Amino acid sequence: MLPVQTAFEALATHVRFEHGDSIYQSASSEDFCYRVLSGAVRKCAVTSGGHRRIVDFLLPHDLFGLGEDRRHRFALEASVNDTTIARYPRSFIERLADSDPRVARQIREAACASIDRLEGRMLILGLGRARERVCAFLLDLAGRLDHRRSEAEICLPMSRYDIADYLAMAVETVSRVLTQLRLEGVIYLSSQRSVRICDWDALQWNCAATRSVSPRLRASGSCIAASRGTMAYSA
Amino acid sequence: MLPVQTAFEALATHVRFEHGDSIYQSASSEDFCYRVLSGAVRKCAVTSGGHRRIVDFLLPHDLFGLGEDRRHRFALEASVNDTTIARYPRSFIERLADSDPRVARQIREAACASIDRLEGRMLILGLGRARERVCAFLLDLAGRLDHRRSEAEICLPMSRYDIADYLAMAVETVSRVLTQLRLEGVIYLSSQRSVRICDWDALQWNCAATRSVSPRLRASGSCIAASRGTMAYSA
DNA sequence: CGCGAAGTTGAGAGAGGTCAACTCCGGTGG
DNA sequence: CCACCGGAGTTGACCTCTCTCAACTTCGCG
């Protein structure tokens, strides 16, 4: 990070939340933006049908609430205990961005990261099968927590219910898939919230849609397999 | 738009594409960004399993390819004939953004719009049922094309196959839902690509998840129904 | 007119949602 | 220290929705 960071941090207020606490409500309009320091935050909405949907999980180092002066569309809540958040006054950030191109660029990059994450998630949600979505979720989480191919345990910073709402499926299905993966030796669950990935390749393999390849692919022709870790950005 | 617009447009190259033409391939790295002038563009990826997934549709006025200097993650293709695109050299845009806060702000806003669209789509994809997803898709499209509650026909700028890949479902299901809506008098199909929405309320109503409300909602408590047209922004 | 692509319709099967029972775990209070 | 309690997680049985496969119709274009 640039020295600008210091200016940011001088204005930060640190707040601590417990599991389930609301950071801000949907439709509220406080003028702050935030950074996750520890724990995890879920961004959620409720469909008009009454179902909760989780749009994103914010992990340590992620920024959120940066946007515009419009009202919040989603509610943000801590999804685990001991979640700490740094809060910055948004107007100051905006002024800083206007006066210092480096800050503006940082914000653009943060926005890119956000778009990247959303588009990746879009692909995960599009995966037809429950198993594929769970596997993709685990890999994504492991990547974001920097547990690449290490033997270390991943501590899931959310409940099964959260995972279900995030992947748009029933809790029971999440549970079933996890047990199945456990029985196959792909993952090891030392406790309900701790996963160790034993077979990365199997997990990766499971992300591939196993359905038949539609013949329409031939028609449009020009699509090439997407590779992880790179991105485009559309606005 | 600000006078800055002129500087943008002076550098624009206009290009025309026919249905199915590739604007850029995934994994290529040309240094341009683009704006849709007419027609429609689909942003697509292919899952490792060989299934095509459409991540976004870009309509007139939408910007894309703005991001970073990293390689493109998706392929972009025209989804209808007579699609025209304005192309701008990205390095220039970046320099302009660094020197003029107004440009930087515009780009931030464009990024916000993109995030807004993606998050909305996230919610649509999360809708469990095919009918809900199609209804939400139609409403979203109508909104973006500015056909709010007008009697005018919406010209669908994409095939059923595209819609299917966008909503992560089978073409047959898309077709079935559309006929069902037609038979119920909710929509009128004057041709295969022209939809007139007859009953906006019915369409809106169908976006509500009809499944049972999960009891877990009581537990977390703080979620409030999300309202369309407002947004939060996370990075 | 004829061809291929796009779209529709039908029948069957499988994946996942729903409902319900049950177990596991952490916290609280006697 | 143990019993109890509630929420979280798991497992099973059933049933619905949608994907699949296949046949057919419609549309657009040479």
Image (spheres, coloured by chain):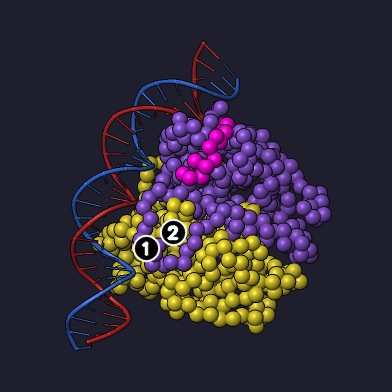
Chain colours: A yellow, B purple, C red, D blue
Give SS at disc 1.
helix
For label 1, the crowd category at 10 Å Cα-Cα, with few meaning under 14, some 14 to 19 and many 20 or more, is: few
Q: Which residues are magenta?
A: B191-206
> Residue at coordinates 53% horizontally, 77% vertically from top-left?
A85
Give D12 or B33, whichever is nearer the viewer.
D12
Q: CA distance from mark 1 to mark 2?
A: 9 Å
Pointer 1 and pointer 2 on the same chain? no
The residue at which mark 2 appears reads as A52
Give A158 or A46, whichever is nearer the viewer.
A46
Asked whether residue B132 is drawn in magenta, I would say no
Q: Which mark is residue B216?
A: 1
Chain under numbered label 2: A
For label 2, the crowd category at 10 Å Cα-Cα, with few meaning under 14, some 14 to 19 and many 20 or more, is: many
Decide: marks 1, 2 in contact (CB < 8 A)? yes
Give the residue type that dot 2 points to.
Arg
Give SS at disc 2.
strand
In the image: residue B215, left or right of residue B14: left
Give the residue type that dot 1 points to.
Arg
* Circle count: 2
> Residue at coordinates 45% horizontally, 30% vertically from top-left?
B183
